[in-house]
């Protein structure tokens, strides 16, 4: 199911890393018994009204923006001094919001913030899941610093790219 709803996972060249990303998603989905249909219908944020962008489409859009940004930087700055680990960038993009599957629950057919989510926002849950599945600290850093929780932290190049791609999608909705 995961590679069907998030085909960008196949862009991760490191097979072990790809499997770990899938394992994180599997655990997060099992937490509340999410289905592909529900994941493809719930809004990507609860911080704005009448959000039409779905959770899965947001993740895919942000991941594609991250890949495109890296490709442009490679093309234009072929001798760029800041190397980007594309596998880490993609893994971070695909996992940045996975914690929302713990943060959200469905009540009366509507996605709402769960009691768990009122205490822990998704960057924390996402890092916890990533740690449990032995993802590299570089990927956990991307998850941890992608949103407001990362303000004031020194972000890696991959985290900078994801942070801006994520907020492009978020700010356009707000």
Image (tube, helix red, strand yellow):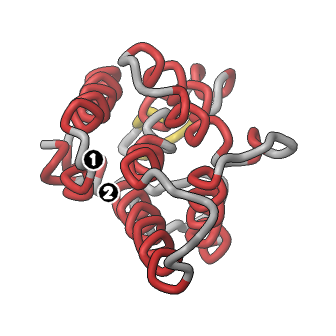
User: In the depicted view, which residue is nearer to us: 118 or 157?
Assistant: 157
Q: Is 151 rendered above or below residue 55?
A: above
Q: Residue at x 36, y 18 (%)?
A: 133
Residue 57: quarter of image: bottom left
Look at mark 2 in the image and give the residue it sits on: 41
- Most extreme residue toward the right is 152
Does the CB distance between marks 2 and 1 fall below 8 Å? Answer: yes
Q: Is residue 64 left or right of residue 73?
A: left
Q: Residue at x 61, y 50 (%)?
A: 159
Q: Residue at x 52, y 19 (%)?
A: 128
Q: Quadrant of the N terminus?
A: top left
Q: Is residue 172 left or right of residue 154?
A: left
Q: Is residue 10 left or right of residue 141?
A: left
Q: Is 29 rendered above or below residue 6?
A: above
User: In the depicted view, which residue is nearer to us: 109 or 163?
Assistant: 163
Q: Residue at x 42, y 13 (%)?
A: 132
Element under disc 1: helix
Q: Position of residue 153 (x, y in %)?
A: 81, 40
Look at mark 1 in the image and give the residue it sits on: 38
């Amino acid at each position: 199911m995961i590679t069907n709803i998030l085909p960008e996972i196949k862009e991760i060249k490191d097979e072990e890393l790809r499997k770990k990303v899938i394992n994180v998603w599997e655990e997060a989905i099992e937490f509340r018994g999410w289905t592909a249909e529900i994941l493809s219908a719930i809004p990507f944020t609860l911080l704005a009204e009448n959000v039409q962008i779905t959770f899965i489409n947001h993740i895919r859009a942000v991941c594609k923006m991250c890949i495109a940004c890296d490709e442009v930087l490679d093309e234009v700055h072929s001798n760029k001094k800041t190397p980007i680990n594309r596998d880490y960038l993609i893994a971070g993009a695909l996992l940045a919001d996975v914690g929302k599957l713990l943060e959200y629950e469905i009540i009366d057919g509507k996605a709402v913030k769960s009691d768990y989510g009122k205490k822990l926002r998704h960057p924390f849950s996402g890092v916890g899941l990533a740690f449990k599945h032995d993802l590299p600290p570089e990927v956990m850093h991307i998850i941890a610093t992608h949103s407001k929780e990362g303000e004031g932290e020194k972000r890696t190049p991959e985290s900078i790219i994801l942070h801006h791609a994520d907020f492009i999608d978020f700010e356009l909705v707000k």
